[in-house]
Image (cartoon, helix red, strand yellow):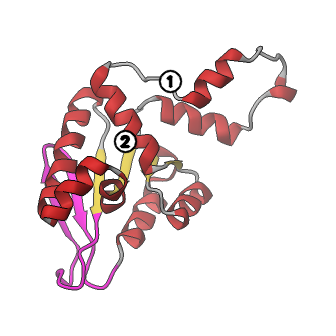
Amino acid sequence: MSVHLIIDGYNIIRKSPELLSKESQDLRWGREALLEKLAAYRRLKRHPITVVFDGGLAGDSLSSRDCFQGMLIIYSRRGEKADDVIKRLTDRERERSLVISSDREIMVHAERVGAAVMSAEDFMFRLQAAFFNDEFAETEEDQANSSRTKKKGPAHRDSKKLRRQRRRVKKL
């Protein structure tokens, strides 16, 4: 079963120096650069991806949806924040989703409904690692955990919730 990635678009752009420089020239260029990277990642990993952007004050009274190379792109309604759209998607997808945002409120909500969460910085690291090799590049945390001695028995296990979340993140 693949993991549905729900991505806070502008949050990712503003955490990446490369994407931020493109966005500072033109807002559309930043979005397009992010979508190109995500499309290449989707071709490599085959996860369903939904990217949510703020529609802004000049946006439409209805949320607009677009499709870009197999990814669903959602712009929030006028006056509505992308955070609200992400929360609705997370409520619907629950355990099948991985929410990518550094917004604390979104992360707490996603964890509350059973979705896995990942910060924008961690995802950008994994995105870059995926292009360098097809396997997951270990983070410092994974390296530190692998250097420890393995303990046996259920008393030393992580909680079920944490183990489920790690399984979903490993699929990236």
Three-letter residue code for mark 2: Met
Which residue lies at the image location 42% right of the left edge and 50% below the top edge? 120
If you read the primary sequence from the N terminus, does the residue marked by circle 2 or circle 1 appear first?
Answer: 2
Three-letter residue code for mark 1: Glu
Q: Say whether residue 149 is left or right of residue 93.
A: right
Residue 40 in percent (x, y) is at 19, 34
| Magenta run includes residue 60 | yes
User: SS of the residue at dot 2?
Assistant: helix
How many residues crowd around disc 1 within 10 Å: few (fewer than 14), some, or many (20 or more)? few
User: In the rendered view, would you say 105 is above or below 149?
Assistant: below
Q: Nearer the viewer, residue 152 or 128?
A: 128
Q: Quadrant of the C terminus?
A: top left
| Magenta run includes residue 49 | no
> Mark 2 to mark 1: distance in Å?
14 Å
Residue 152, by quadrant, is top right
- Which portion, as a residue range, is magenta? 53-80
How many residues crowd around disc 2 within 10 Å: few (fewer than 14), some, or many (20 or more)? some
Q: Say whether residue 11 is left or right of residue 140.
A: left
- What is the total number of numbered labels drawn onto the structure image? 2
Q: Nearer the viewer, residue 110 or 19?
A: 19
Residue 154 in percent (x, y) is at 83, 25
Which residue lies at the image location 78% right of the left edge and 28% below the top edge? 157
Which residue lies at the image location 59% right of the left edge and 61% below the top edge? 108
Where does label 2 land, which residue? 124
Which residue lies at the image location 25% right of the left edge and 27% below the top edge? 44
Where does label 1 land, which residue? 138
